[in-house]
Image (spheres, rainbow, N blue to C red):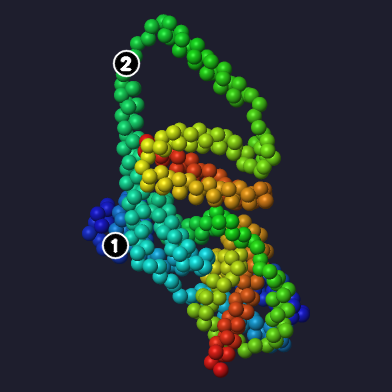
Amino acid sequence: MTTDGTNNVAPDSLSDYELAQASARGDMQAFETIYKRHHRRVYSLCLRMVANATEAEDLTQEVFIQLFRKIGSFRGESAFTTWLHRLTVNHVLMHFRKRGVRLEKTTEEGEIGEIQDFLQAGAERPRFVDRIALDKAISELPPGYRTVFVLHDVEGFEHEEVANMLGVSVGTSKSQLHKARMRLRELLNKKTETKKETKK
Amino acid sequence: MECRAVVSSLSDYLDSRNVWASDDEVEQIETHLTNCPTCRNLKLELSEIKNASRELPLHTPPTALWARISKAIEAEISTENGIARVTQKASGWWGWLNSRKFTFSLPQLAAAGAFAAILIVAGISGIFGEKPSPLNFRNAQGSLLLPEEDEIKANLERRMGAINARKAQWDTERRSDFEQRMNRIDESLKRCRNMLEDNPNDAGRREMVRALYDEKRQLLEDVERLKW
């Protein structure tokens, strides 16, 4: 570290805010430490939202380049992670808009179809959710459901925030989330049944 | 309460049962869940999905990604330094101009005064003259547009014309890099404009179109500053 106030201090021991300040002064070592700390979260968020590894890599690259440009505007009023996540989400949503992905579009079947399927299937024994299977199932959701689910359930944004980011009503955000969870449940059950059949 | 109604409300119930306006509705759902094993199991499953989603494994991008990012940032920094040098050069020229002492004869001053008067008259007619309404979202051809789009387009075309005249002198790599970037912006712009025409009330898309025009302007400005 060669920057003021952080001389001779190992970058790893600095806070995100200190690293951000050093990066804003052009310290690439500080910025690399920020990358090392946060790249997995950013990449995972991109990957979950776009469900495509190559696109997620490109987006992660763009997010960190944008972060480097904007890092001087981070004032430490909120947690750096929150700020970076908001930046990432906005960037991915911008990418969706450029690509013309319609987030408001639902799947071919509506909520009624899903409720009927569930009622016809009857009671099933609940099981612990396999996180890897859940991760895979999220990537199989239609973009509109997936985006709301990732923002609300995975990243912890409130419905008001999700609605604001996507330009939809709170009611739409809630209904997309419910449909997403119902679809995930269906996908997870299918995966379990396939596993059972393979074992037989 | 019927299963169908409970199923529809389950996610909302799981997320905000403590802040629901109607305690009565919560009570009805809870009574139903006590008596209906199907809905109870669904509630457990949805709840598990919700909880598990906060603890999903993190993915790791390829290790080469940092090399790509740092290379791109360093390239950007060196481009900015290039721009700064060009600006510095310009400010040097401006400084030289300022430091000069000029003396004018009476006819020269009269000519300058007449020229200034013409500029003022042209400016006033520009301000008070007929202008397209900012609320008019359609051009002469009837396609849906941003209010300021004609002006933006004219500006970009003028700049593009000057750049096109110089492009023949560029090397192949520079030309192809510029054209690729320009094509990428143009394609996105075309797609976003089409979508805006489909849904003129989409404020987000309108902002996107503006952002893309801005990106295009930025690219042309960079080329101009670098004196390619």
Residue B201 at what x, y percent from top left? 67, 49
> Which residue lies most toward the bottom here?
A200
Residue at 53 percent of width and 92 percent of height: A199
Tell me: residue A143, above or below residue B55: above
> What chain does badge 2 belong to?
B
Say left or right for A146 vs B228: right
Question: Observer-nearest residue: B123 or A56?
Answer: A56
Residue A200 at what x, y percent from top left? 56, 94
Quarter of the image that includes the N terminus of chain A? bottom left
> Which residue lies most toward the right here?
B1
Question: Observer-nearest residue: A191 or A104?
Answer: A191
Residue at 67 percent of width and 76 percent of height: B10
Residue B13 at what x, y percent from top left? 66, 74
Query: What separation in Å lies between label 2 and label 1 (alpha carbons)?
Result: 54 Å
Q: Choose top left, top right, bottom left or bottom right for residue A170.
A: bottom right
Identity, as a three-letter code, of the amino acid under mark 2: Lys
Residue at 37 percent of width and 63 percent of height: B65
Task: State whether residue A62 appears in this view.
Answer: yes
Q: How many marks?
A: 2
Say left or right for A148 vs A120: left
**Circle on res. B145:** none
Residue at 37 percent of width and 58 percent of height: B69
> What chain does badge 1 belong to?
A
Task: State whether residue B18 appears in this view.
Answer: no
Q: Choose top left, top right, bottom left or bottom right for residue B95.
A: top left
Q: Report which residue position mark 2 lands on.
A: B101
Q: Secondary structure at mark 1?
A: helix
Both marks 2 and 1 on one chain: no
**Circle on res. A11:** 1
Residue A194 at what x, y percent from top left? 57, 86
